[in-house]
Amino acid sequence: MTMRWKKRFAVILAVVMAFLTMPAVTARAEGEGAVWSHPGNGWHYLQGTDIKVRIADDVISIEGTGALPDADYWKLYERPWHTSSATHLRIASTITSIGAYSFYKCSNIKSIEMYTSTFIENKNAFEGIAYCPVFRIADAELQTRMYGTIPYTSLDSIQAFAQSNSMGASYILNDKKRAEMFQNSTNPTISNVYWASDKNAPWSDVASNGNGNKATNICRLSPSTPDYSLKVSAQRLYPGLACYEVYGVFIEDYTFATTFNLCVEKDNKALYQTDKELEYVLTIPAEYRSAQRSFRLLGIGSGEVYIYDDLDSVTETITFRTDKPTTAYALVYK
């Protein structure tokens, strides 16, 4: 075998699989204990915290410091804004995170103002808001969570949310460079990303100025092991957070770069095991390329983590062999 080695780590892999198969209606226990008081004049206070909400003048304003906890899926009616007709949502930069189901099915919300300093804990936090909403994301100091030596920032969480939304959302950031980095953080690129001074920024008309959602071919079978019956595709995507925990255990003295999903298909069915090892060539994103670096891939298998060292000497690519291709990978280097 040409893979460097494989290691069993059943406990963590069980966590990963549980995360990936978690039902959409599951919320963390913290949200079940959220208790709001309502003294009047549109104000609501989250007991035990200094987080407060004001609902007035077509705006829901989330203020204070700390995390907005998960909402209990079975008690969404307890959210202060549950029956609100407000169309605008403002989240202060001091709100550290937005919990699961926070604004789930709040179908009137079509404009969200938030900061890069706030984690989105789950994509369902905004699932079911108005179609084609506009997220105005202003700059603030990023928060970072560490998974071993792997950093995961509040901006990463927002980009992870944006890669998977299917509601026609657009994202407006402070400057052109930040907007370009945001859009190009995944492959396919994130749709509808703009900077605030862009004349095409869709403050009121998203449909006329769409952009993004462009995919480039970043993986192929090596000519040394051709198989024309197979279809190979790869995406540069954010995985579930449990994957970071696994990568953090096996990264050793390497530095984390990015993550990919690889899929090998035959007759339109994904192949998790091939008859023999095949050789794949994966494109290294330009920002990580260096002739002085050595790369490897960490692949998550069924109860195993596979570690693949680079078989080529080309700066732009990493070549590896496997008979278990369809899975999630992390690219690391030193």
Image (cartoon, rainbow, N blue to C red):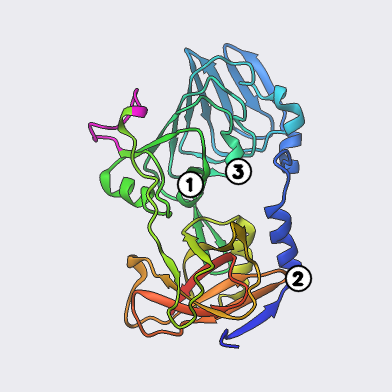
Residue at 48% x, 14% y: name it: 58
- Judged from the image, the secondary structure of the residue bearing numbered disc 2 is helix
Callout 1: SS: helix
- Up the image or down, 250 lies above or below 124; here it is below
**From what the image shows, is residue 1 above or below residue 52?**
below
User: Badge 3 is on which residue?
Assistant: 122
Which tag, 2 or 3, sits closer to the chain's start?
A: 2
Is residue 253 visible to the viewer in this orientation of the structure? Answer: no
- Kindly identify which residue carries mark 1: 163
Check if residue 191 falls in the magenta segment. Answer: no
Q: Position of residue 199 (x, y in %)?
A: 22, 31
In the rendered view, does 199 fall on the left or right side of 221?
left
> The residue tagged with tag 3: helix, strand or loop?
loop
Residue that carries the numbered disc 2 in the rendered image: 10
Q: Residues within 10 Å of mark 2 (few under 14, many from 20)?
A: few
Q: Quadrant of the N terminus?
A: bottom right
Q: Residue 79 falls in which quadrant of the image?
A: top right
